[in-house]
Image (cartoon, grey):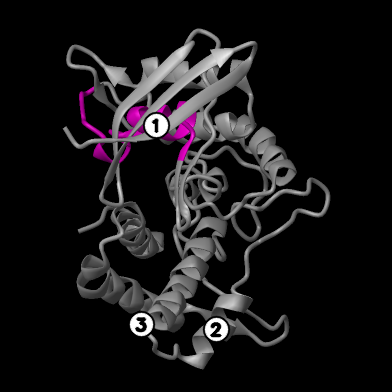
C-alpha cells in the first residue's frame, strides 16, 4: 500500500536487487546467491526489460512515467510522474547487467536482448552548460527533497570520476530543500564529501544530523517539518553509514574491501574492532597524522 504517487517509485525494485548483491559481496555465500539472491536479481531484471521503452529516433531505451527517489516532484512541484529519472535508469541498468553477470557465473547464456537493453539504457547525462547529470529529463533546477544524483555515487557506485562527482556535488548540494529537509541529505552528502577528501565540509554536513534527532528519544525524522515523533526507518541507519562508509571509507567491492578513510578535523582516531567479511574477521585502525590518514586492516581471530 503506497501513498500518493509512490506506487510509481519503481526504483525500489532495483534497490532490493542491489541489496541482495551487496549481501553476497559481503559474505561470499555462494549457496545464498544461487538459492535466493540470483532469482531475485534475475526476476527484477525481467521487470526492467518489460518496463523500458525503445526510442527509435534516438536508438536508446528509456523508462517513462516514474516517480524518482526525489518525491518532491509531486509533493511540491505538481508533477505526477517524470521521464528518465537518472537514479531509476541507473539502477535498472545495473540490475540487468548484474543479472547477465550471474547467468555467466552459472555457465548459462543470458538473453541477447538484455545485453542490448543494458547497453542502451539512457541516463540523462549531461546538461551541456553545467556539465552535470540531470535528475530527470526536463529537470529545471528546482529544489530537491532527496539527493538522487549523489545516490549514484553512494551507494550505487555508478558515478566514479572525481571531477564529475565534484561538479554534481557542488551543484546539487545547493539544491537541497531546507524546508523539506530530507535526512538522506546528511547521510549521502557526508559520504560523498569524504570521497572528495573535503575534510572541513565533511563534518559541517555530518553535524546536520543534530537537526534530525527528535527529542526526547532522539528518533530519526524524515524531514525537519516533522515535529510529531514519527520515526523514519528508511534513514535510521544513515548516521552509522556515515561513520562506516564515510569516515571509515569502507567499500564492499567484488574484488574485496577497499579502505579510503577521511577523518573530520575534530576526530583523530577511529577503530572498527570487528569487521566480518567473507568468513573472516578484521580489525581496522585509522588515525590522522600531518593531515593524512594512516590505517591498518588486519585479520584477527573470531573471538
Q: CA distance from mark 3 to mark 2?
A: 17 Å
Going by the image, does 3 lie left or right of 264?
left
Mark nearer the N terminus (2 vs 1): 2
Mark nearer the N terminus (3 vs 2): 3
Going by the image, does 112 lie left or right of 40?
right
Which residue in the protein does label 1 denote? 244
Q: Nearer the viewer, residue 161 or 76?
A: 161
Write the residue at 64% across / 14% down.
291
In the image, farthest residue toward the right: 129
Q: Nearer the viewer, residue 215 or 158?
A: 158
Classify 10 Å Cα crowding around label 3: few (below 14), some (14-19), many (20 and above).
few
Q: Is residue 236 magenta?
A: yes
Q: Quadrant of residue 294?
A: top right
Residue 206 to residue 71: above or below: above
Whether residue 26 is visible, yes or no, is yes
Q: Nearer the viewer, residue 107 or 7?
A: 107
In the image, farthest residue toward the top: 266
Q: How far across and how far down the image is residue 62, in percent?
A: 57, 74
Q: Quadrant of the C terminus?
A: top left
The stretch in magenta equals 228-250
Q: How far across and how far down the image is residue 250, in percent?
A: 45, 38
Q: How far across and how far down the image is residue 77, in percent?
A: 52, 46
Helix, strand or loop under label 1 = helix
3 vs 2, front mark: 3
2 vs 1, front mark: 1
Q: Quadrant of the N terminus?
A: bottom left
Residue 302 to residue 261: above or below: below
Which residue in the protein does label 2 denote? 115
Which residue in the protein does label 3 denote? 106
Amino acid at each position: 500500500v503506497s501513498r500518493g504517487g509512490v506506487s510509481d517509485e519503481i526504483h525500489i525494485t532495483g534497490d532490493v536487487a542491489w541489496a541482495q548483491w551487496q549481501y553476497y559481496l559481503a559474505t561470499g555465500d555462494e549457496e545464498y546467491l544461487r538459492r535466493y539472491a540470483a532469482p531475485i536479481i534475475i526476476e527484477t531484471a525481467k521487470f526492467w526489460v518489460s518496463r523500458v521503452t525503445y526510442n527509435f529516433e534516438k536508438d536508446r531505451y528509456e523508462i517513462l512515467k516514474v516517480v524518482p527517489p526525489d518525491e518532491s516532484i509531486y509533493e511540491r512541484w505538481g508533477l505526477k510522474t517524470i521521464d528518465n529519472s537518472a537514479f531509476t535508469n541507473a539502477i535498472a541498468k545495473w540490475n540487468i547487467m548484474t543479472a547477465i553477470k550471474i547467468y555467466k557465473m552459472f555457465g548459462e547464456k543470458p538473453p541477447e536482448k538484455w545485453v542490448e537493453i543494458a547497453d542502451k539504457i539512457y541516463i540523462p547525462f549531461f546538461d551541456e552548460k553545467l556539465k552535470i547529470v540531470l535528475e530527470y529529463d526536463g529537470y529545471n533546477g528546482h529544489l530537491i527533497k532527496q539527493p538522487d544524483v549523489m545516490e549514484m555515487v553512494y551507494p550505487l557506485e555508478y558515478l566514479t570520476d572525481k571531477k564529475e562527482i565534484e561538479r554534481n556535488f557542488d551543484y546539487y548540494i545547493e539544491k537541497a530543500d531546507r524546508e523539506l529537509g530530507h535526512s538522506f541529505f546528511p547521510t549521502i552528502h557526508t559520504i560523498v564529501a569524504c570521497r572528495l577528501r573535503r575534510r572541513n565540509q565533511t563534518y559541517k554536513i555530518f553535524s546536520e544530523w543534530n537537526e534530525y534527532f527528535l527529542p526526547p528519544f532522539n528518533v530519526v525524522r524524515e524531514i525537519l517539518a516533522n515535529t510529531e515523533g514519527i520515526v523514519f526507518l528508511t534513514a535510521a541507519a544513515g548516521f552509522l553509514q556515515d561513520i562506516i562508509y564515510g569516515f571509515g571509507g569502507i567499500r564492499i567491492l567484488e574484488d574485496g574491501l577497499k579502505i579510503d578513510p577521511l577523518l573530520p578535523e575534530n576526530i583523530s582516531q577511529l577503530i572498527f574492532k570487528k569487521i566480518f567479511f567473507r568468513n573472516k574477521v578484521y580489525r581496522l585502525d585509522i588515525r590522522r597524522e600531518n593531515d593524512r590518514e594512516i590505517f591498518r586492516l588486519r585479520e584477527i581471530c573470531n573471538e
